[in-house]
Image: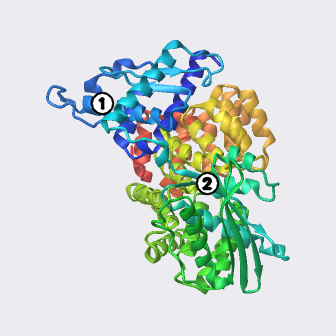
Amino acid sequence: MEPNAQRDQAVRRELDTILSSPGFVQSKRLTDFLRFVVERHLDGKDDELKETLLAIEVFGRKADYDPKQESIVRTEAGRLRSKLIEYYAGEGRNDSVVIELPKGRYTPVFHITDAATADHQPTFRSWRFRVGLVTLALAVAVTGYWRVSHSNSPIDIAVLPLKNLSSDAANEYFADGLTDELIRELSTIDGLAVRSQTSSFVFKNAPRNLDEVGEQLGVDYIVEGSVLREGRRVRINAQLVRVRDDFMVWSGRFDREMTDIFAIQDEISRGVVNNLRLKLGHTRRRYETSIEAYDLYLQAEALRVQGPPGTVREIATFEQAITKDSSFAPAYAGLGLTYALRSIQFPVDHPLDELQKMRAAAEKAVELDPLLGEAHEALALVYSRYGQWEQAEKSFRYAVQLDPNRSNTYTEFALYLLRVLGRNDEAIQLLRIAERADPLSPEVQSAMGFLLIAAGRFNEAAEHCHKMSAEDVSKKVCLARVRLGQGNLSEAIQLLVQEDNNPARRGFLGYAYARAGRREEAEKMAAASGYANERALIFAGLGDKERTFEALDGMAFVGPQRIGIYLNLPELAFLQGDLRLKAFRKKVGLPD
C-alpha cells in the first residue's frame, strides 16, 4: 500500500476510535466538527476549512453568517481541542495516531508512530507532541478542568459460559440462557463494561486459560461457574475471579427451587458489584413468571444463535412462552426482535401479517416494562421498518442508554437505520463501540466489513471480511465486493462463482461480469433473474441508468428500509446526482 494511503487508513481508523469514545458519543456537535475537518483534510479540501464555511456546513448557520457577530466556530474549536486533550490523556494515551487541532487553525495535524503504519517511522515531532500533551493535561488537572482518570474508567468483565452439570445434555440451553441473562443483568450496572455473549461463548467447552481469556477479551475479571438442574430444583455455583493472578474475589453457592431463579441472578450480580466496590443502581427488573414460561424463553433465545434456519422455531417458542405468561415482557421483546429481523431479509417469503405481529409484540414489551432495553430495541426496528426515522433513532438511543453494553443494539442501529439513511460514518462509529463490547463476534465483523464497503474504505473492509465466520455464506460476497471496489474484477468473479449457497451473490456476479466487459453473460443473468434487486445491480454494472431505475421501481413494494440498504451500495453510486433518484427516494419514503 502507498504510504499516503496507509496514513489515511490509519487516521480514519483513529477517527472512528475517538468518535466511539464516551466523551464524543455524548456530543454530536463535537463529533460532526471533528469528522468534518479530518475528512476534508484527508480529501485535500483544506480550502473548505474556513470559519464561515464551517459555521454553515457544520453548525447550520445561514449563508450570511458573520464571524464578527457570532463566535460559535471559535468556541467549539476550543471545546474540541480540550476534548481531544482529555481523550489522549486518558483512554487514548497509548494510541499510535494522534489527531491535533492546533490553536488558531481549523486544519488538523496528524502525528503517526511506527505502530500505526509499517512504513512510517516515528518522528521527533510526534513524540514532542505527546510530551506536550501530557504536560498540558497535567496543567489542566491542576486547574480542576481535567477529570479523566483511570479510577473512574469502567471495570472490564466477562461472564464465561456456565457449565452444564446435568446428566441430560438437553439442559445445555438452560445453562447458556442463564449465562446470557447474567451478562444482561451486569450490563445495566454503571461502572461495568461487560463483554457480550458472542465473544464470551467463544470459550464454551474450552480448557480454562485465564491469560488467554483476559488477552482476547481485554478484561480484568471474569465470572464463571456451573449449573445443575434436577427437576424443579437448580444448583448454581458462581465465582468472581481476578484475571491477572487467578485470585477468587467472591464465590456463591445457590441450591434453590426453580421459582427462585431471578432472585439467584440478583444475588450473583450483587456479589459481583459489592466485591468490586460499585453501587448496584439500576438493574433489570425481577420478573414474577412461571418456570414453564421462563424455560421456553431461554429455549427461544438459544435458537437465535442458529440464525435464519432457527427463526420459525424461535418465533413459535416465544409465542409459547407468552401463552404461559402473557405479562412476561422479555418474551414479547424477543418475539418483536425476531419478527423485525426476519422482515428485513431478502428474498424470504414473508407472511402477510408479519409487520402487524412485529409491531404488536414490540409495543406490548414496552408497555409491560418501559425500562427493558431489548423492548426499545425491538420498537426501534419496528419504526425503521415503517420508515419512521426520527422515532426509530430516539428508540435506539434510549435502548443504548438503558443497556450500554449490548452490542446487538449498536449493530442493529448501524445496519438497519444509519446505513439505510446513508449515514455510514456514524454507523461505523457505533460498530467500533460494538466491537469493544464484543471483540470476538463474527456478526460485528461482518457488519463492519459491509459498512466500510458502503463507505468506500475497501482496504479496511478486507480486514473485517477475513474475520467473518467461515460458515457465513456472506463472507465470500464481502471479500468479492472488496475486490470489486479495488478494481480486481477477475478475483471478484472467482470468489462469486465459488459461492453457491448465498442467493445475494447473483446480482453482484452479474455486476462483476458487466464491469469486466462480459456483457453478454451479464445480460443473460438479468434476463433469467426473477428478482428486481438482482437486475438493478446487473444493469448498474452495465452502466444502464434507465433499466436500473426500472428495476428499482420494481422493488418499491419492499418498503423504504430495504430500499435504503440497496441505494447505499457503492455499486449504485453512479445514480447520484440524477434527479430521478431524488424523486424515487421521495416516492418510497426515504429522506434526501
- The residue that appears at 42% across and 55% down in the rendered structure is 393
Left or right, 65 with respect to 444, comes to: left
Asked whether, in this view, residue 188 is left or right of residue 196, the answer is left
How would you rate the neighbour count of disc 2 (Cα within 10 Å): few for under 14, some for 14-19, many for 20 or more?
A: many
Q: Which element is circle 2 on? A: strand
Instruction: Identify which residue is drawn at 74% across, 50% down.
Output: 210
Q: Is residue 332 visible?
A: yes
| Location of residue 179 by image quarter | bottom right
Q: Secondary structure at mark 1?
A: helix
Query: What's the residue type where badge 1 is placed?
Result: Gly
Residue 330 picture location, percent across and down = 55, 73
Judge left or right: residue 207 versus residue 413.
right
Instruction: Give me the disc on residue 157.
Output: 2
- Observer able to see residue 542: no
Which of the two marks, 2 or 1, is nearer to us in this view? 2
Residue 551, image x, y percentages: 56, 46
Say which residue appears at 43% left-offset and 55% top-offset. 397
Residue that appears at 35% across and 29% down: 139
Is the residue 316 above or below the residue 142 in the image?
Answer: below
- Marks 2 and 1, Cα distance to the nearest angstrom? 35 Å
Residue 330 versus residue 95: which sits nearer the camera? 95
- Mark sitting earlier along the chain (2/1): 1
Residue type for callout 2: Ile
Residue indicated by mark 1: 78
Identify the disc placed on residue 367.
none
Most extreme residue toward the right is: 167
Where 85 falls versus 300 (above or below)? Answer: above
397 vs 201, nearest the viewer: 201
Q: Nearer the viewer, residue 340 or 285?
A: 285
